[in-house]
Image (cartoon, grey):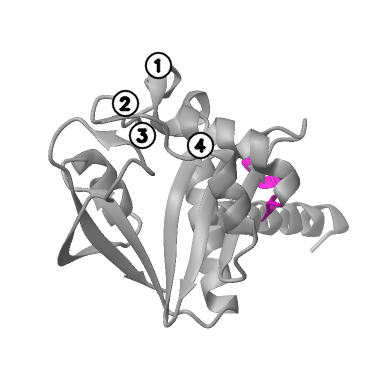
Amino acid sequence: MTAYLFLQVARLHLSFYCYSISKKLGLQSLKNKFMPITKATKADVPELNKLINSAYRGETSKKGWTTEANLIDGIRVDEEALNKYFEDPQIIILKNVEPDGQITGTVYLEVRRPKLYVGMFSVSPTLQNSGIGRNLLLAAESYAHELNCHTLTITVIGIRHELASWYERRGFKATGEIQPFHDGSKFGIPKQRLDLIVMEKRV
């Protein structure tokens, strides 16, 4: 085999390898590979607060498909609650950061051995369906392995069928357990009766 042919075959194998890895990770574009997901800190609280509420509540949230604005009044979280999360050693908050430093995605992880609870999953409304959510979920799975937790567990509003379907496509299954929506106004005020379904995934 000539040096030229050898080089071409090597390039082909490298291209196929990169494609296989990106497909396995669920990355939709090369750009997403350069959006690091790291642990958030207290310094991120103001930006996280804005992002999370924009993904769930208010008019801005309606630009994405994860909005709860038609179901729940009030805010999803506040800075006081976020600061308390950072003081809990069992809680990890991850952030997805754009090259310009903007936080465009976040997820809350809480160790509930032998499970890892996943909550407050938020992606900027204008960037939903761009692969950020999938990458955050993969990062959550990685942390579950690191923490020796073998199951991811989440709760989804029962009538949010499209959201439950999104999780099902990523390996989650409903356990059959149904929980009442959170008491009080900490997570907002429901406009109707809401229940939460529990979904889990072995990792």
- Of badges 2 and 3, the one in the foreground is 2
Residue nearer the viewer, 174 or 89? 89
Rounded to the nearest angstrom, the CA distance separating label 2 from label 1 is 7 Å
Q: Is residue 40 magenta?
A: yes
Three-letter residue code for mark 3? Thr
Residue 36: x percent and y percent? 70, 49
Q: Where 14 sits versus 77, above or below?
A: below
Neighbour tally class for label 3: few under 14, some 14-19, many 20 plus, Cα within 10 Å:
many
Mark positioned earlier in the residue sequence (2 or 1): 1
- Residue 59 is tagged as 1
Residue nearer the viewer, 17 or 79? 79
Quadrant holding the C terminus: bottom left
Residue 157: x percent and y percent? 23, 46
Three-letter residue code for mark 2? Ala
Q: Where 42 sits versus 126, above or below?
A: below
Rounded to the nearest angstrom, the CA distance separating label 3 from label 1 is 12 Å
Contact between marks 2 and 3 (CB within 8 A): the answer is: no
Q: Which residues are magenta?
A: 30-41
Q: Which residue is mark 4?
A: 52
Rounded to the nearest angstrom, the CA distance separating label 2 from label 4 is 13 Å
Q: Which residue is mark 3?
A: 66
Mark positioned earlier in the residue sequence (2 or 4): 4
Instruction: Farthest residue to the top: give it.
Output: 59
Q: Which residue is mark 2?
A: 69
